[in-house]
Image (cartoon, grey):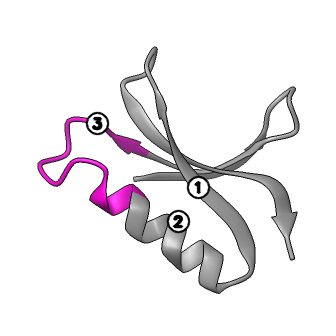
Amino acid sequence: MTAGFKKSAAGRMVLGRFPASHPRGSWPAEEFAAVQRRKGTDARVVMDLPSDSFLVISEHGTR
């Protein structure tokens, strides 16, 4: 997992990046997103096809 808090032009923040080639697929990204939601961050998982990665993003920051 690569953690980072990079803001995109659309106002989305990338909270984490997970390789799609992981043996467990998107599970690590989903688990990370769940932890972020418990902390109050609006996080969801999306697939970034060009980088072949699952991204955990937040569009609204913390609640």
Placement of the C terminus among the 4 image quadrants: bottom right
According to the picture, the residue beneath numbered tag 3 turns out to be: 20
Q: Is residue 50 left or right of residue 21?
A: right
How far apart, in angstroms, are the residues tagged by discs 2 and 3?
Answer: 15 Å
Earlier residue among tags 2 and 3? 3
Residues marked 2 and 1 touching at CB (< 8 Å): yes
Residue position for label 1: 44
Question: x, y percentage for residue 28?
Answer: 32, 61
Residue under the point 73% across and 71% down: 41
Q: Residue furthest bottom?
A: 38
Q: Is residue 33 left or right of residue 29?
A: right
Cα distance between the residues tagged 1 and 3: 15 Å
Q: Amino acid at mark 1?
A: Arg
Q: Nearer the viewer, mark 1 or mark 3?
A: 1
Q: Give above or below for 49 relative to 63.
A: above
| Residue 33 marker | 2
The boundaries of the magenta stretch are 18-29
Q: Earlier in the sequence, mark 2 or mark 1?
A: 2
Secondary structure of residue under mark 3: loop
**Numbered disc 1: secondary structure:** strand
Q: Secondary structure at mark 2?
A: helix
User: Residue 23, percent across and down?
Assistant: 11, 49
